[in-house]
Amino acid sequence: MSGFSAYTSLVRDSSRTEYQTRIHRVLGHIEDHIAEDLPLEQLARVACLSPFHFHRVFRAMMNEGLNAFVQRRRLEHAARELDGRRHTTILEVANRYGYENAAAFSRAFRRQFGVSATEWRRSEGNARRVRLLGEKERTRSKDRKIGTDLGEPVWEKLTHRGTTMPPAAESARPRIERLPRVDAVAMHYVGAYGSSDITKLWMRLMAHADAMGVVHAETECVGILHDDPAITEPERCRYDACVIVARPISDALVSSVVLPGGDYLVFPFVGAPVDVDPAWDAVYRALVDSGYQPANGPNLEWYPPQPILDPAKGVFRCKMCVPVVSL
């Protein structure tokens, strides 16, 4: 690659990362205020763009219009509540997400999911979950390894060399834990969970973070799962790969993000990618008996220092974290 070509590639990547950072701020604002009015002008200010340009940039980055995105996320939140909070009425859920009457909510819900809210709660929500998670597992089965695209020095920093293995996932006990607020650098992905593209995302992030000098033996990482793969269609699922840093960092190729912390149900995990979905099922079985309910916020996969146990077999460790509040 010529010097000019390398320069133009860097400018292009830097520009795209800047837009990703702005849209990422907007997505976070939407999730934090999902049940409130979200006028275009307000979201444009969050993105530091004019309203005229903002909704066009949003569509270009998300491949979905702003209004369609907001309505979809409200309905996905509602669908999750219909599953998880069966003591609430459908009208209560509808009101919580901005629908003044059950009829308007029912029409929108049927357009989104192809069934009524009553049918969803009775059986169709579970049928969709089985279908989407089956698609996710078929995607994951195509690439069960962690990946080998990093240089040996980086693998050395990420690989656990101790003589004892952490406890197996089957014997791990979930607990409520308050996670700290931390700064991180991130790269973003939209698409199917379980895809090898997420592996490639991590490889790119770790290589760049190592070049920045922020990867060492005590480095912690976090994967942020913004969507429920049992509800959101695979091509619209969002994932952030994050490396925790000591202080905010400005860089052309990564976004600077803040993980707000808070109370989480934490489940220690050890296994290969194929073991992840059954482990998440165990997390939610534990949640039912915990005295807590899911809070508004994404699930996390929190990777401790040296999370890789066996690169050849794809074995790693992490904490699977669900944000919670008391029942």
Image: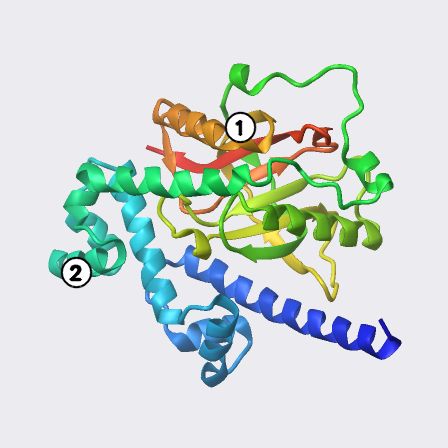
Tell me the quarter of the image containing the C terminus.
Answer: top left
Q: Looking at numbered disc 1 in the image, what kind of residue is underneath it?
A: Asp
The residue positioned farthest toward the front in the image shown:
142
Image side of residue 215 versus residue 303, left or right:
right
Image side of residue 18 versus residue 171, left or right:
right
The residue tagged 2 is 107
Q: Identify whether 157 is placed above or below 255.
A: above
Total marks shown come to 2
Coordinates of residue 257 in the picture (x, y in percent)? 62, 56
Q: Looking at numbered disc 2 in the image, what kind of residue is underneath it?
A: Arg
Task: Please give the label number shown on residue 241.
Answer: none
Q: CA distance from mark 1 to mark 2?
A: 38 Å
Coordinates of residue 161 in the picture (x, y in percent)? 80, 24
The residue tagged 1 is 275
Q: Residues within 10 Å of mark 1 (few under 14, many from 20)?
A: some
For the point 53% across and 28% down, the residue is 275
Disc 2 secondary structure class: helix
Query: In terms of depth relative to the viewer, which is nearer, 254 or 194?
Result: 194
Tell me the quarter of the image containing the N terminus.
Answer: bottom right
